[in-house]
Amino acid sequence: MKIDIGISEKQRENIAQGLSRFLADSYTLYLKTHNFHWNVTGPMFQTLHLLFMDQYNEQWMAVDLIAERIRALGFPAPGSYKAFSGLASIKESEGNPKAREMIKELIEGQETVVRTAREIFPLAEKAGDQPTLDLLTQRMQIHEKNAWMLRSLLEE
């Protein structure tokens, strides 16, 4: 059945493509955060282990919201590692970095997700797509806060 929500098909498609990149970045950050939760070591182990767990659990819930918004716009959500690797701008971590490097990589990942969200904003604004704007605003707020919290761990 045809979708008639007051947003043209082309606009919905462009927004869905942007959200697909956003989903890929979000999922890649989720996976990287979970990996670091498992593999962090050193004097900050307990603090980082718990912080990373809080962050990956929150990210896990978010990827579902993003995918469901893509579906509500009438397009399939990407859902494979191959699809995500082709869409994501966050790179996977190689090896097992030290704790401070993990923090730096996660800061970069959080900020990348925010930048990806900002790229979609004008498309959603032009289309009057308030649900997508709301989703992006909420996600940007969370990722900016996460980046700030991670950055604070690098202060001497």
Image (cartoon, rainbow, N blue to C red):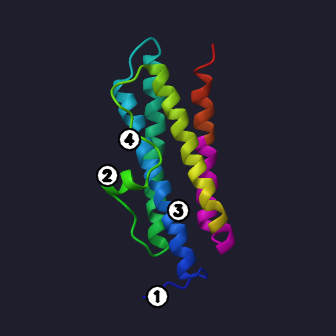
**Which residue is more in the foreground, 23 or 87?**
87
Contact flag, marks 1 and 2 (Cβ < 8 Å): no
Task: Tell me if mark 3 has few (under 14), some (14-19) or many (20+) residues whose alpha carbon lies within 10 angstroms of its own.
Answer: many
Measure how far apart labels 4 and 2 are at the Cα level.
11 Å
The residue pinned by badge 2 equals: 81
Does label 1 or label 2 sit earlier along the sequence? 1
Residue count near mark 2 (Cα–Cα under 10 Å), binned few <14, some 14–19, many ≥20: few
The residue sitting at 48% across, 57% down in the picture is: 21
Front: mark 1 or 3: 3
- Answer left or right for 3 relative to 83: right
Give the mark, 3 or 4, whose residue is nearer the N terminus: 3
Residue position marked by numbered label 3 in the rendering:
18
Answer with mark 1 or mark 3, whichever residue precedes in sequence: 1
Q: Which residue is mark 1?
A: 2
Q: As shown in the figure, which amino acid type bears the numbered disc 1? A: Lys
Which residue type does callout 3 highlight?
Gly
Residue corresponding to mark 4 = 31
Q: Main secondary structure of the magenta part?
A: helix
Residue 140 locus on image (x, y percent): 61, 48
Q: Residues within 10 Å of mark 4 (few under 14, many from 20)?
A: some
Q: Residue 124, percent across and down? A: 63, 67
Looking at the picture, how far across and down is residue 7, in whole percent?
Answer: 60, 79
Describe the element under mark 4 as helix, strand or loop.
helix
Q: Residue furthest bottom?
A: 1
Seen in the image, is 130 located left or right of residue 1? right
Query: Answer yes or no: do the residues labelled 4 and 2 have beta carbons within 8 Å?
Result: no
